Image: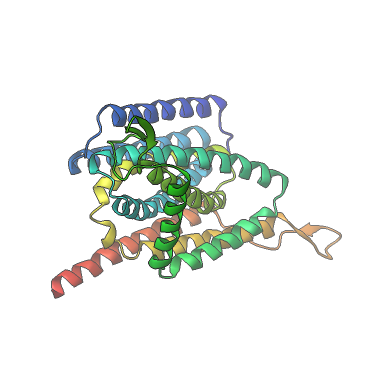
Amino acid sequence: MHTLPVWFEIGSFAVLGLILLADLLIVIKRPHLPSMKEAGLWVGFYVALALVFAALLFLFTGPEFGAQFVAGWVTEYSLSIDNLFVFIIIMARFAVPRAYQQGVLMVGIIIALVLRGIFIMVGAVVIEQFSAIFYVFGAFLLWTAWKQSRPEDEESDEATENALIRRVRKLIPMTERYDGAKLRTTVGGKRIFTPMLIVFVTIGLTDLLFAVDSIPAIFGLTQSAFIVFTANIFALMGLRQLYFLLGGLMDKLIYLKHALSVILAFIGIKLIFHAMHVNELPFLNGGKSIAWAPEIPTFVSLAVILGTMAVAIVASLLTQRRKSVAK
């Protein structure tokens, strides 16, 4: 397997940084509700960009790194789509004006990138120094998969959210209404915060929870911090436009959460196998230590991830079609 050239890593981050900056400037200068066509074109652009990047990885670094990126990107993209369910709920509960939802989502994406960058750096160091951490990651993903497969307790979530809002309002003076996309506004000659602050806090906490889930998942597919971070960037790029494109379709993907549960469980098992493989046990075999678990190849992981998502999407659409016909 080839090593990643330094010029390739630096060039990739420079180009991705410029694209994200341009996206941010567009949102700041022209806040608006994108049409389905506009959102679809942007999503197509970012997906095509990720595929071009994957092709470059295959070309310059070989099939192993390329397959690791595709598997990581698909996994992170799937988890990011799951984020959209939560974002839709947050926007609805806080009645964020549609014209300013792009800005809110962009801030959420920036927060997610920062948090995931920190998690990736810490994770890479821990993995290098303590390979047995894969046991912890694997067990955590299995627990997350089990939790993901259970029905959500929306009343409990809403009670927790309302408690957070009440606490924030007690600590920080705040208006009852929005003032565009502003965090602060002037009321009676005083500068006070708007409800947009609570929206950003809620999205930031949500991003933190998703980062805790997603980073161990992708480290189960690759130990390259560069691939982990770029897969996360490509998964988050275009998420803002995907929100407007799929907003009306999210309820139709009824088996998406089950697919994510299967994927997380598979990666959890893969991590535990990897830990068992790396942390060899001494056997009475001439004093040598031998690996006592198989390694699951990257291409097998990619096939499982893509196959699971395809089955979930097709099954969801067929189920919705039967329901519409029955009506």
Where does the N terminus fall, quadrant-wise? top right
- Residue in the foreground of this view, choosing between 292 and 313: 313
Q: How many numbered callouts?
A: 0
- Residue in the foreground of this view, choosing between 300 and 312: 312
Where does the C terminus fall, quadrant-wise? bottom left
Residue at far right of view = 287
Q: Position of residue 98 (x, y in %)?
A: 24, 43
Q: Position of residue 49 (x, y in %)?
A: 36, 35
Question: Taking 16 as reference, is 214 above or below it?
Answer: below
Note whether residue 196 is visible: yes
- Residue in the foreground of this view, choosing between 219 and 155: 155
Residue at far bottom of view = 326
Q: Position of residue 212 (x, y in %)?
A: 54, 51
Residue 226 position by quadrant: top right
Residue located at (24% from left, 47% from top): 245
Residue located at (50% from left, 42% from top): 63
Residue 283 position by quadrant: bottom right
Residue located at (86% from left, 59% from top): 287
Q: Position of residue 149 (x, y in %)?
A: 44, 68
Residue located at (60% from left, 59% from top): 138
Q: Is residue 283 left or right of residue 224?
A: right
Residue 258 position by quadrant: bottom left
Note whether residue 71 is visible: no
Q: Is residue 207 left or right of residue 220?
A: left
**Colour scheme of this structure image?**
rainbow
Question: Taking 298 as reference, is 240 above or below it?
Answer: above
